[in-house]
Image: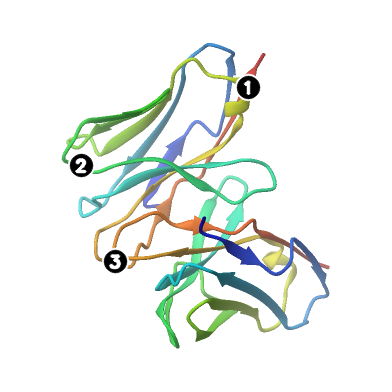
């Protein structure tokens, strides 16, 4: 079974902190994604990566950056956390052009 | 601008009934339309998907109906069960675009026993 593992289920951070969300997949997938899930807004794409060290902005990249130094690991970075970044963050991976995306269990981040 | 619009936001159905969730899209370049199911505390998981060369796809109690001319697709859950209670997301993507999906806003389904 494909496994996408996010390092934390719950995080509480203070405003202004630098926050790292980590994601690891074990299926050698080329593509990895970070989504943000908010009630009534669905899943919105923050960033994605189609290869090591390659990244592309999604629909809502402001306030975020990403890092992909190894194929299996994709990190989301909140440079200076703000309260409006309180949300559920979902990592996903996939292989090929248009195939199934496998999601992690999510990280619920609260910024206070 | 939301690329995929989903309705209703929430749905209550009696056990054994039919659940219907609708989605509409704007971009005619989309050519892959999956539905994802998410249980509380879990990430979304692929439920069923369709490509626009067919008008319907059925897997067990789950059916996608696709209307290319209307740019609409829907999920039908027949004989709905309490275990189907979850949040459902429709999505759309364009082949060759790195699996970049555009998701609907989600429908929270509650199947009452």
Q: CA distance from mark 3 to mark 2?
A: 17 Å
Question: What label does residue B97 carry, if any?
Answer: 3
Residue B1 seen in the figure: no
Which of B89 and A40 lies nearest the eye of the viewer?
A: B89
Q: Nearer the viewer, mark 2 or mark 1?
A: 1
Q: Which numbered dot is residue B82?
A: 1
**Are discs 3 and 1 less than 8 Å apart at CB?**
no
User: Residue B36: where, in percent of width, then height?
Assistant: 47, 43
Residue B25 left/right relative to B103: left
Q: Are marks 2 and 1 on the same chain?
A: yes
**Closer to us: B71 or A105:** A105
N-term mark: 2 or 1: 2
- Measured as percent of width and height from the top left, residue A68 is found at 51, 84
- The quadrant in which the C terminus of chain B is found is top right
Q: Residues within 10 Å of mark 2 (few under 14, many from 20)?
A: some
- Pointers 3 and 2 in contact (CB under 8 A)? no
Q: Residue at x 55, y 50 (%)?
A: A41
The residue singled out by tag 2 in the image is: B52
Q: Nearer the viewer, residue B28 or A27?
A: A27
> How far apart, in angstroms, are the residues tagged by discs 3 and 1?
36 Å
Q: Is residue B53 above or below residue B12?
A: below
- Foreground residue among B81 and A107: B81
Query: SS class of the residue under badge 2?
Result: loop
């Amino acid at each position: 079974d494909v496994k996408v593992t996010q390092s934390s289920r719950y995080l509480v951070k203070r405003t202004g902190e630098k926050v790292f969300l980590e994601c690891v997949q074990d299926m050698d997938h080329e593509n990895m994604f970070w989504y943000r899930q908010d009630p009534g807004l669905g899943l919105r794409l923050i960033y994605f990566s189609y290869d090591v060290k390659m990244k592309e902005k999604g629909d809502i990249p402001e306030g975020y950056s990403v890092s992909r130094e190894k194929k299996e690991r994709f990190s989301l970075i909140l440079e200076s956390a703000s309260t409006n970044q309180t949300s559920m963050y979902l990592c996903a991976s996939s292989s090929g052009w248009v195939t199934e995306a496998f999601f992690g269990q999510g990280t619920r981040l609260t910024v206070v | 601008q939301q690329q995929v619009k989903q309705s209703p936001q929430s749905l209550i159905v009696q056990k054994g009934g039919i659940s219907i969730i609708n989605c509409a899209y704007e971009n005619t370049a989309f050519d892959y339309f999956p539905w994802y199911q998410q249980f509380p505390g879990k990430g979304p998981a692929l439920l069923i998907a369709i490509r626009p060369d067919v008008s319907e796809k059925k897997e067990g109690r789950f059916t996608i109906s696709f209307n290319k001319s209307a740019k609409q697709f829907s999920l039908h859950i027949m004989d709905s069960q309490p275990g189907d209670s979850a949040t459902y997301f429709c999505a759309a993507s364009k082949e060759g675009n790195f699996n970049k999906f555009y998701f609907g806003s989600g429908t929270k389904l509650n199947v009452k026993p």
